[in-house]
């Protein structure tokens, strides 16, 4: 009996030990399993900070940042003082934008001995010394405000949207508006008249007006002026904000032109005004200067040959993308005298004389922009140069006085570059 009692005591002791060890292992295992932190509501608005949650280190809070916010004060980089604007700190980190806003999750951290300043994503944070509480941005869901309203009127600019980089705004431009000041080409200073810039870039006309959409861009170190579609933009140096036009491109407005000498458009004498695409131009005895959405060009004859062309808008493929061009296709002239005579030949029975280099028609061009002249056997594409296209009996001759011209030879099926002082003949026959 004594032995049996001792055995029971030992058995009970062993069981108790095993039970306690199991409990301890279970507790250790539970502690080793990480628990997810559930974010709690934090606040809303661009002025909201995290001071109310100071000391709750490791806790997470969600903030709502409305569209088109106004940046607040921020102290620090990546780790921010808890009195910083949470939404603005999220912009500084690149999680959201001022325009789009969104939902931002932060985590509370202990205070730091110092906070470093920096400029990121259009936001400049401040430096600070010792502070009692901090936070970091751990997650965000950016918002999408769509296209905002810029307003209606030719006097309106985009300066008030400068901080909303990437945001888009629609502007209404009434018909028969009064043009304002514009700085830049394609990329415009944000204090430019949006509607006037839209005319300059070729989106609308002054007479018809319309609705245009812009996208806000950072400021540039320089802006290049140019003359397009009857609007002359100015050049400028460094400026703090810019915009470009986006969205569907409407029909290109027709060119406007001025004439010296005798210029005919569709058979009628032309002194100035709008020139429709598809028009037949005759500059044999005059000079026509045209301003288009793609640049400005002056065309004229050499005083001896017919200088006639049809004005069209076309395109060419560059880097797999279609780029618009203004094309002048030479017309007129008498080619009946170019037919080679046939003579008898002893060996083959007949032979053809080579066509003579007799010029039939020609057209000079001088300007800056995207233009092409098209003759019978080649086309000449230019970006800013002075060149002559001559259709002769033996082919199309391209002569370059200034700049570089890209000539497409229809007969040989090849493309060549012709520099200033050079000529290239695309033959009528191989």
Image: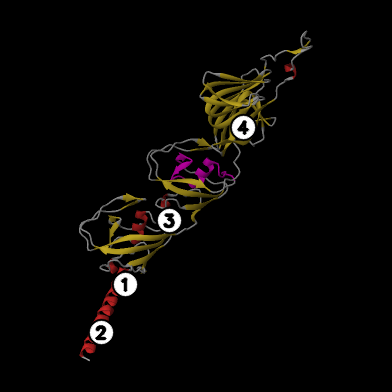
Q: Distance between the residues labelled 3 and 2?
A: 71 Å
Q: Is residue 352 magenta?
A: no
Between discs 1 and 4, the one toward the N terminus: 1
Is disc 2 surrounded by few (<14), some (14 to 19) or many (20+) residues within 10 Å? few
Q: Residue 12 carries which label?
A: 2
Q: Is residue 85 left or right of residue 232?
A: left
Tell me if residue 77 comes above or below residue 388 in the rendering.
below
Q: Nearer the viewer, mark 4 or mark 2?
A: 2
Q: Give the range drawn in magenta.
A: 181-207
Q: How far apart are marks 1 and 4 (CA)?
A: 78 Å
Between discs 3 and 4, the one toward the N terminus: 3
Q: Where is residue 175 in the image (x, y as percent from the top left)?
A: 57, 48
Q: Is residue 201 magenta?
A: yes
Q: Distance between the residues labelled 1 and 2?
A: 27 Å
Q: Do the residues labelled 1 and 4 touch (CB within 8 Å)?
A: no
Q: Which of 73 and 192 is in front in this view?
A: 73
Is disc 4 surrounded by few (<14), some (14 to 19) or many (20+) residues within 10 Å? many
The residue that mark 1 highlights is 30
Q: Nearer the viewer, mark 1 or mark 2?
A: 2
Q: Distance between the residues labelled 4 and 2?
A: 104 Å
Q: Is mark 2 on a helix, strand or loop?
A: helix
Q: Position of residue 148 (x, y in %)?
A: 48, 56
Q: Residue 99 carries which label?
A: 3
- Give the quarter of the image for residue 363: top right
Q: Nearer the viewer, residue 186 or 127?
A: 127
Is disc 3 surrounded by few (<14), some (14 to 19) or many (20+) residues within 10 Å? many
Q: Which mark is residue 327?
A: 4
Q: Position of residue 109 (x, y in %)?
A: 27, 63
Q: In this view, does 167 lie to the left or right of 1?
A: right
């Amino acid at each position: 009996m004594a032995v049996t009692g001792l055995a029971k005591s030992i058995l009970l002791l062993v069981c108790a030990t095993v039970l306690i060890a199991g409990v301890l292992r279970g507790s250790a295992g539970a502690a080793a399993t990480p628990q997810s932190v559930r974010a709690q509501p934090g606040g809303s608005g661009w002025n909201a900070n995290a001071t109310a949650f100071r000391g709750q280190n490791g806790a997470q809070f969600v903030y709502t940042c409305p569209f088109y916010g106004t940046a607040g004060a921020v102290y620090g980089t990546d780790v921010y003082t808890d009195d910083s604007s949470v939404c603005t700190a999220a912009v500084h980190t690149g999680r959201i934008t001022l325009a789009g806003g969104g939902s931002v999750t932060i985590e509370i951290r202990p205070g730091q001995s110092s906070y470093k300043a920096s400029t990121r994503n259009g936001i400049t944070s401040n430096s600070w010394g010792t502070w009692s509480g901090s936070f970091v941005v751990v997650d965000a869901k950016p918002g999408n405000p769509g296209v905002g309203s810029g307003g209606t009127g030719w006097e309106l600019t985009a300066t008030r949207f400068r901080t909303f980089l990437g945001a888009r705004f629609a502007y209404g431009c009434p018909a028969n508006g009064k043009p304002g000041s514009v700085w830049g080409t394609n990329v415009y200073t944000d204090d430019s008249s949006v509607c006037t810039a839209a005319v300059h870039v070729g989106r609308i006309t002054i007479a018809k007006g319309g609705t245009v959409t812009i996208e806000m861009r950072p400021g540039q170190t320089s802006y290049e002026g140019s003359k397009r579609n009857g609007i002359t933009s100015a050049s400028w140096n460094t400026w703090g904000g810019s915009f470009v036009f986006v969205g569907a491109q409407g029909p290109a407005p027709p060119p406007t032109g001025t004439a010296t000498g005798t210029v005919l458009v569709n058979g009628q004498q032309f002194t100035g005004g709008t020139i429709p695409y598809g028009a037949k131009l005759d500059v044999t005895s005059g000079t026509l200067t045209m301003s288009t959405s793609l640049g400005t060009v002056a065309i004229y004859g050499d005083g001896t040959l017919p200088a006639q062309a049809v004005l069209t808008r076309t395109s060419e493929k560059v880097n797999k993308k279609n780029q618009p061009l203004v094309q002048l296709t030479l017309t007129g002239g008498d080619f009946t005298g170019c037919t080679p005579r046939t003579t008898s030949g002893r060996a083959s029975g007949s032979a053809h004389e080579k066509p003579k280099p007799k010029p039939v028609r020609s057209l000079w061009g001088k300007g800056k922009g995207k233009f092409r002249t098209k003759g019978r056997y080649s086309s000449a594409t230019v970006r800013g140069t002075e060149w002559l296209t001559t259709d002769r009996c033996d082919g199309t001759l391209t002569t370059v006085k200034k700049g570089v011209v890209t000539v497409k030879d229809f007969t040989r099926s090849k493309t060549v570059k012709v520099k200033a002082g050079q000529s290239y003949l695309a033959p009528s026959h191989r």
